[in-house]
């Protein structure tokens, strides 16, 4: 299958979906045309009767219009739920220790003592509220100030997400068909980040047990959760390693290139580069698509450079 995505003069430019590596990077500053391009690709895939699954991770609600084209809009906390603690070990611990890092950078890294209290709190807990109550109990019974400070630090890092309805239970599996996960109603960027990370672990686990095949995952604002983790492999990298066996491919839509994990950048065989303003982004994008930096920096709105493979 080939999907027309635009034109070079009057000649159509197409995505070749028969290629083994279809992972795609769409990068550009705000209002340059990234989302319009992605919506155009999706509508053309529908027109060509794409027979796989599509899952759009939409933090702003801008893909809601796809409902009238047959997509199902799912809202976390209303008709879609994921409880991180329903995943098998060691995923819940990995999710809750990596989430603060994605949300706060190096400030979010947990010390060994903080990780120890969190691991104890996860034992026999059924949901995040159980974890919260156990941590509070540990703090109230702590006999020294160092322990109390460590537990308080864990509580402060995780507090924004303990009571959100979207994390109270798990219902069903990753939905098949064409779906938009509308994260815009989840309050706060921290909670959106945790939901995204948990979803990635669910996708990874589903692919590992062979329950997910032939799926396109579209990640809007990928720079929110796509930066380089400290001392571990990125969960998206794990997904892409595992799910390439099952026909999954990812589209990363981002405002930046330099802040994306190198592993993600290198995995994308298809690249759409719109105008970029940050000098570091411009230089890196130039090396990726073999175009002079000044040409990237002066691209008009709605135009991009496109490179697929060699």
Image (cartoon, rainbow, N blue to C red):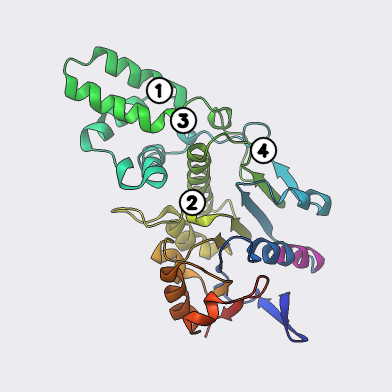
Q: Residue at x 74, y 66 (%)?
A: 40
Q: Nearer the viewer, mark 3 or mark 1?
A: 3
| Disc 3, SS | helix
- Tell me if residue 175 can be seen: no
52 vs 295, left or right, is right
126 vs 271, left or right, is left
Q: In terms of depth relative to the viewer, which is nearer, 8 or 87?
A: 8
Tell me where residue 125 appears, x and y as whole percent.
41, 24
* Residue tagged 3: 160
Specify which label sits upstream in the sequence, 3 or 1.
1
* Residue tagged 1: 132
Quadrant in which the N terminus appears: bottom right
264 vs 28, left or right, is left
| Disc 2, SS | helix
Q: Residue at x 60, y 46 (%)?
A: 59
Give the numbered dot on residue 75.
4
Query: In the rendered structure, which segment of residues is drawn in magenta?
Result: 41-47
* Residue tagged 2: 224
Q: Nearer the viewer, mark 2 or mark 4?
A: 2
**Up/down of 240 relative to 74, above or below:** below
Question: Local crowd at mark 1 within 10 Å, few (<14), some, or many (≥20)?
Answer: many
Specify which label sits upstream in the sequence, 1 or 2.
1
Tell me where residue 28 appears, x and y as whole percent.
56, 66
| Disc 4, SS | loop
Tell me where residue 70 appears, x and y as whole percent.
81, 52
247 vs 154, left or right, is right
| Disc 1, SS | helix
Q: CA distance from mark 2 to mark 4?
A: 19 Å
Contact flag, marks 2 and 4 (Cβ < 8 Å): no
Q: In terms of depth relative to the viewer, which is nearer, 156 or 78?
A: 156
Contact flag, marks 1 and 2 (Cβ < 8 Å): no
């Amino acid at each position: 299958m080939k999907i027309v995505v635009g034109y070079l003069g009057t000649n159509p430019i197409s995505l070749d979906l028969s290629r083994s590596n279809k992972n795609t990077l769409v990068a550009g500053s705000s209002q340059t045309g990234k989302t319009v391009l992605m919506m155009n690709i999706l509508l053309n895939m529908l027109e060509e009767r794409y027979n796989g699954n599509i899952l759009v991770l939409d933090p702003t609600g801008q893909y809601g219009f796809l409902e009238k084209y047959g997509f199902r809009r799912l809202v976390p906390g209303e008709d879609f739920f994921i409880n991180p603690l329903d995943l098998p070990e060691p995923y819940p611990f990995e999710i809750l220790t990596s989430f603060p890092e994605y949300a706060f950078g190096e400030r979010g890294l947990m010390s060994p003592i903080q990780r120890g209290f969190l691991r104890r709190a996860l034992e026999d807990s059924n949901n995040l509220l159980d974890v919260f109550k156990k941590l509070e109990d540990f703090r109230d019974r702590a006999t020294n100030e160092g322990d109390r400070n460590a537990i308080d630090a864990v509580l402060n890092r995780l507090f924004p997400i303990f009571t959100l309805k979207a994390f109270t239970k798990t219902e069903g599996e990753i939905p098949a068909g064409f779906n938009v996960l509308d994260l815009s109603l989840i309050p706060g960027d921290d909670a959106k980040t945790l939901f995204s990370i948990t979803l990635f672990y669910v996708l990874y686990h589903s692919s590992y047990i062979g329950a997910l095949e032939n799926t396109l995952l579209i990640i809007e604002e990928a720079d929110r959760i796509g930066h380089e983790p400290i001392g571990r492999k990125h969960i998206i990298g794990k997904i892409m390693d595992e799910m390439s066996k099952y026909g999954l491919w990812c589209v990363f839509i981002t405002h930046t290139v330099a802040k994306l994990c190198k592993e993600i950048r290198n995995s994308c065989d298809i690249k759409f580069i719109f105008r970029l303003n940050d000098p570091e982004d411009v230089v890196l994008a130039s090396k990726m698509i073999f175009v002079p930096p000044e040409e990237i920096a002066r691209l008009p709105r709605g135009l991009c450079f496109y490179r697929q493979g060699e």
